[in-house]
């Protein structure tokens, strides 16, 4: 998709697991492409994959985001649950929100423990997205 000269894709796919017991992402693989604009996070044992393609995101992450460990995993999970709900609400309201920005649902299951790295990157993507596109997903201050 092309939005104001910026190519944006945020893909978050989860496939249901056999059990709903909390699980960990201890074996998640985080992989950047050579261009630095794409991030792939995958865990075959939990059957999920996160792909973020956003020019400028990784430069922003390195320069402005709080460092890993600054937020607790519980904080990141709770904020991500709220922001995923808001994101999905906007996907379902294409006439009200830009369908090119909110074109794909995010399946974030609160019964699955995705682990710190996944939650940290998703949280920071939401911060970056809100700042870059002048959006608000609630009343939280999104300045890092």
Image (cartoon, helix red, strand yellow):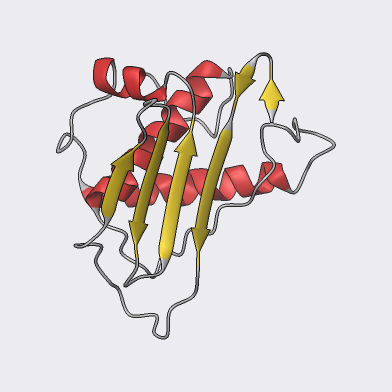
Q: Nearer the viewer, residue 138 or 24?
A: 24
| Residue 29 image position (x, y, % from top left) | 27, 53
Looking at the image, which residue is at 59% across and 24% down?
135
- Which residue is nearer to you in this view: 63 or 110? 63
Please tell me in which quadrant of the rendered image residue 6 appears. Answer: top right
| Point 60% across, 25% down: residue | 7
Q: Quadrant of residue 79?
A: top left
Q: 40 or 134: nearer the eye?
A: 40
Whether residue 132 appears in this view of the structure is: yes
Specify the farthest residue to the left. 69
Please name the residue shown 26% across and 15% down the image: 63
Q: Position of residue 3 (x, y in %)?
A: 69, 21
Name above or below for residue 135 compared with residue 45: above
104 relative to 54 in the view: left or right: right
Extreme right residue here? 95
* Residue at 54% in and 40% down: 10
In the rendered view, would you say 80 is above or below 57? below
> Going by the picture, which residue comes out furthest to the front?
34
Quarter of the rendering occupied by the C terminus: top left
From the image, which quarter does the N terminus lie in? top right
> How far from the left and from the top, in percent, is residue 83?
50, 43
């Amino acid at each position: 998709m092309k939005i104001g000269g910026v190519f944006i894709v945020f893909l978050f796919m989860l496939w249901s697991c056999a059990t709903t017991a909390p699980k960990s992402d201890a074996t998640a693989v985080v992989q950047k492409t050579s261009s630095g604009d794409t991030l792939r996070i995958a865990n075959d044992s939990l059957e999920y994959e996160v792909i973020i393609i956003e020019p400028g995101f990784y430069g922003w992450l390195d320069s402005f985001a709080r460092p890993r460990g600054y937020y607790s995993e519980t904080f990141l999970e709770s904020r991500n649950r709220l922001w995923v709900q808001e994101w999905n609400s906007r996907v379902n309201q294409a006439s009200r929100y830009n369908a090119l920005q909110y074109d794909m649902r995010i399946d974030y299951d609160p019964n699955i423990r995705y682990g710190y790295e996944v939650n940290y990157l998703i949280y920071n993507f939401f911060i970056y997205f809100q700042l870059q596109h002048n959006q608000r997903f609630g009343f939280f201050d999104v300045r890092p």
